[in-house]
Image: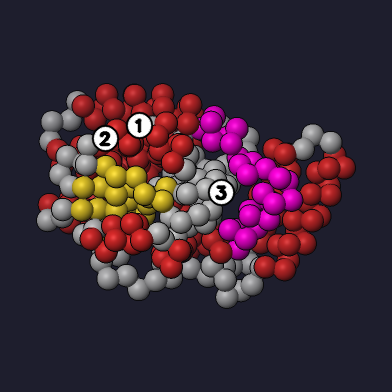
Amino acid sequence: MKVKPICFLCASKQIYDVSNLLYKIEDDKFNFILKVNKKLLEIFRKDAVPTQIGTKLHRYIKLISKNEDPFKPLKNKSNEISKKFYEILKEKLDQISSFEEKVKKAIFYAIIGNTIDFAAYNTSMDVSKFLEKDLNQKLRIDDRDKFLKDLKNAKKVIYFLDNAGEIFFDKLLIELLSQKVKVYVVVKKKPILNDATYEDAKLASLDKIKNVFLLDNGGDIIGIDLKALPEKTKKAWEESDFIVSKGMGNFESLSEYNLNKPIYYLLKAKCLPVAKELNVNKEDLICKRV
């Protein structure tokens, strides 16, 4: 997916939000915003993918702020909140007797977990309020039956995580998948935005689930750059029968590739460009097979 004009506003809003995370003095915020917006003007190109711009922008933010993980406090907050939701939703899943119906419900839970995105909304969002609202929604695109069919014939699946906090919702689905197949779970090697790293995955105990193997994307890259994947992750990609891609960033980047295997995009369409690309409305919940 290529960048749209409105993406500039989203990026600029992120710059403002990060300034509030990093600085308390108004002059410091002002200088930071000017510097980073100047960088944004340099890298914003109509032939670029939004995640490419975002990666360059947030690497620059880390450089000039001398802070390798500006979103760390918010990631901790979202992990804390999501862990509580995990326990509640796990109880609901345990009440379902059919494995297939459990998987379908867990896919739904994983998608509403994509609500936890301080980058797409703002750093003061009420996570609990957003999640409770989404629990009453239905999927706009619902390819869960296709997912079950592919799972039935699969031996290995690669699962690209998105945000911290959100991974507790992914855990519900990953636990079920691991009962049937090997699951390669991919995190960010280094912090970028509020994306999940090894630290977040281990906090959610994903490394303790049988048949689950943690891998990384090769660095602090928003979305997925197939050329940057480490050899172990490339091998897992090649061996997997299908791909699970969480979130908008992974969709924005992977949609640029011609893939030779099924991919399931699990996300909430939190911005107009992504919604338009998927031919849905903003805020719709999506499970789409490509």
Vertical relation: 241 (above or below) 134: below
CA distance for labels 1 and 3: 21 Å
Which badge, 1 or 3, is on the more N-terminal residue?
3
Q: Amino acid at mark 2?
A: Ile
CA distance for labels 2 and 3: 25 Å
Magenta stretch: give its range. 53-78
The picture quadrant where one finds residue 122 is top right
Which badge, 2 or 3, is on the more N-terminal residue?
3
Q: Which mark is residue 205?
A: 1
The picture quadrant where one finds residue 235 is bottom left
Report the residue marked by disc 2. Answer: 209
Nearer the observer, 10 or 159 = 159
Is residue 62 among what the camera can see? yes
CA distance for labels 2 and 1: 7 Å
Q: Which mark is residue 75?
A: none
Q: Secondary structure at mark 3?
A: loop
- Judged left or right of residue 201, residue 76 is right
Q: Amino acid at mark 1?
A: Ser
Report the residue marked by disc 3. Answer: 192
- Judged left or right of residue 187, residue 16 is right
